[in-house]
Amino acid sequence: MRVNKFTIGGIGLGVLGLLTAAACGSTSTPSTSTLASAQVLHFPVFQDPGTFDPGEITAEVDSELMQNVFDNLWRFDNNLNIVPDIATAVPTQANGGISADGLTYTVHLNPAAKFSNGDAVTSKDVLYSWNRAAALQGGYASNLAKVQGYSAVQKAAGAAPTSGTPTTFQGNIETQLKAGNPAFMMSGLTAIDPETVQIKLSGACGWCLTAWTLESTSGAIVDQKAIEAPGVDPVNWWQTPANLVGTGAYKLTSYVPKQSMTFSVVPNWWGSPKPTLQTINIDIKDPSTAPTTVDAFFQKGYDIIGYGGDSALIPLANILAVKANSREAPDLLTKAKGRTTWVGFNIGYPATGGPFLGTGAAATGLRMAFDLAVDKQGLATTVCHNLICSAATGGLITAGLIGNGGANSDPLAKFDPVQAKSLLKQYDPTGSLTAHIIYSYNAGSLNESAAEYLQNEWKTNLGVNVTLNSVSDASIFISSYLAGKYMMSREGWQFDYNHPQDWYDNLWGSISTADGLNATGWDNATYDSTLKTADAESLTTALPLYMQLGQILQSNVVYIPLYYSVSNFLIQPYVSGAGSNAAFDHYWDGIKILSH
Amino acid sequence: MLTRGTLIYIAQRLALILFTLIVVSFLVFITVHSLPGSAFESEKVHGKALQLVLHEYGLDRPILVQYWSFFTNAIHGNLGVSFQIRGLPITPVVMRELSVSAELGGTALLITIGLGTTFGVLAAIRQNSWVDYTLTSIAVVGYSVPSFVLAGLGVLIFSYWLPTVTNGVISYPAEWSGTYGTILELSLPAIILGFYTSGQVTRITRAAMLEVLQQDYIRTARAKGLKSRVVTVRHALRNALIPVISILGPLVISIITGSVIIENIFGIPGLGKEFVESILQADYNITVAVFTVYALLIGIANLIVDLLYTVVDPRIRY
């Protein structure tokens, strides 16, 4: 073969091309987008499931996993928009799904929808699931509170008797539903035909559709046949993989309590997108092992860290180390989460007392003094390194969610030590009122370092010594602060669904007060009436009213805004489609394992 | 051969164990149910919802009624259900975790006896030599340093320091990868757990051996021309083991209680780890169940040790 200059040039170009291609690739990035032969996702969770029963689920880890097993009539997409799931459409007045008076919803079911055991989903399954959830009265049953007959069902199911054999309550509900007892069925729910459900409300409700869409909770559809099958325990039915029948893309195939779970794809799943992942292996780990689990991730022992509601458990030290390592940093995904933390005051519990009690000028002024004395940006920098939280400057509702006022819109987010000192001098000139203030918080997470930061701020900027009260048992802290036993305490809220009602109703509204959730005891007639009006309106109409509610809270200095939570995930570069939004992990059906 | 007297003795001891279990479980049951806090209460579950859950698990009944329910179920092998993992039957979980702890404890016991008697015998037959001083010093360190200190050091050295220094060539997994530990995973926690008790065995074996080696029958055996190894192992060691066996009961108890700490430090999914977690999570049924199982284990271990006396020393009869 004769070698000429064109041949040499061609070889040279070829070599150059190969070198360029090699240089563009990296050791941590898949060289192609082809799929790996094994579509298996492996990640840890740091908590055992409390329950996988959608009627009882309250924990985030349970919900994050079960959103892949159960479906609702609608689902939130990864951008938190409501899209059809088992229902064929999102009901609106324009498409006839909602009546003109807003009180009747007509829902058509997708005839293709099937449970993982092959049973077809019918309107009776919807009625069973919702009636069951209402009767169980779990943490999210109130999402169905506006459906006609909700209260009657709860009454029929019975308040807790003072005696009796355990399991009677749940067992009785299943028995009555199986027997078709109308007392256990909400009158507002009707199966028009096997594929059509009619929902009648007891009053106009602008937030109901969003609440019903909340994944893995009271709106989820379960299989009556599976739960009521002979020999199935009405309480722990979900622990046996064969009983945990949903309509989602995945099903539980193995569960070893306190050790591991395995989920497998449902063959020929009816929904979309068609899943690529075949198997999800989950190790149940102790939270104390989080640092070593991060090590395991970088040794390719895990594909993701932070999924399953555990994104806050990666220790800050590990996150800082990962950020500082150019090879590891690309694997870190940081996402704002829908959780706000603030300082709450005792405003309405006279028995607890304290200088912040009441709505008078002195109490309000002192609350303002303690608020202005805190540098919120400084807290985010000092405590969170601007990595695991950001300063809460846009109001109570977390940035990025509907109802947030935008950066620096909350007057309570200001830091003005001069004004703070002035207010303190005005309303507590002798210092006697603020001499014995106690700030209570539950130990763990950021609470410890945030409390120390606050203590230092109040000491430095007000000259007030605040005693810290760390409560090691979270349940004791919660029961105490809900009962208004703390003069000043850490408070917070993680949103359930992207609607301001979730915040304003559950924290200070008349509903929360009646439910014993109003930790500050602050009560305001204007707030309640505005909230009632807003809740009945569509979101577009209601949003200005909800913004007014935020302003009422601010003008009354009901809280000291601290920070919005930020979560961190570690995701291998070959895991495509994994991620998170403010509420939940991306669904498994959108994840693919690329060649690596 | 079990004599009638031995059988009566065993029956008496079993009755005593049963009585102990009832007392222990009752006291623990009452105590943990009196603790503040709840496995159920959260921002989402409170008030009426909380009352319903408490009713579901029978926790709204009088405490004595609750205990009676626990007791009657327990004698049928049902230790109740978990509160954290709602409705999860505890018995299979406890049995699995017991087997994990048994793997760790059994290995630690082998290390205790193997290492302790070997060191003790060597120290005795090389009395006042560098071998004696070295082994005795190791034994003193063994029973002087708490196991949690050794465990912490072990994790620091083998899971963090050595992997860093050797760039991962030498690395000990900081936690078990599966239900049961591999030989590698088991090695470090078992050695640390057994190290403390092996120190005691070394000390007692050495003292017993020194005493036995002074006996006339040992001198006679040597005079008969028996090899030193035969004299040591067959004649001296067997008799020297009697005091060792007498402390086996406390040693086993030490290993069982020590495993609570070791399992938590090494992330071993056994009874000890469960015990601590259940307390922190207010999962009362598991706490009571694990405590009761511990009491049962200790009772049975003591019984077995007492019966072993008759094997080692035929003069002992019950």
Image (cartoon, coloured by chain):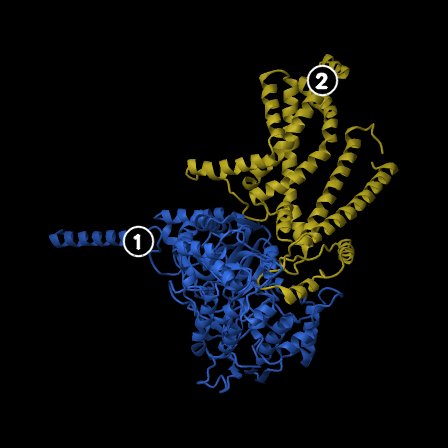
Chain colours: A blue, B yellow
Q: Nearer the viewer, residue B212 or A376?
A: A376
Specify the amino acid type for callout 2: Leu
Q: Is residue B243 left or right of residue A102?
A: right
Residue drawn at x 13%, y 55% is: A6
Q: Return the residue at label 2.
A: B213
Residue B285: where, in percent of width, then height? 69, 54
Q: Is residue A61 visible?
A: yes
Q: Secondary structure at mark 1?
A: loop
Q: Nearer the viewer, residue B143 or A487?
A: A487
Residue A214: where, in percent of width, then height? 51, 70
Q: Say above or below: B146 vs A452.
A: above
Specify the amino acid type for callout 1: Gly
- Which numbered disc covers residue B249? none
Residue A284: where, in percent of width, then height? 55, 54
Q: Return the residue at label 1.
A: A25
Residue A169: quadrant of the picture? bottom right
Q: Is residue A86 visible?
A: no
Residue A305: where, in percent of width, then height? 46, 54
Q: Say above or below: A554 vs B111.
A: below
Q: Residues within 10 Å of mark 1 (few under 14, many from 20)?
A: few
Quadrant of image for the C terminus of chain A: bottom left
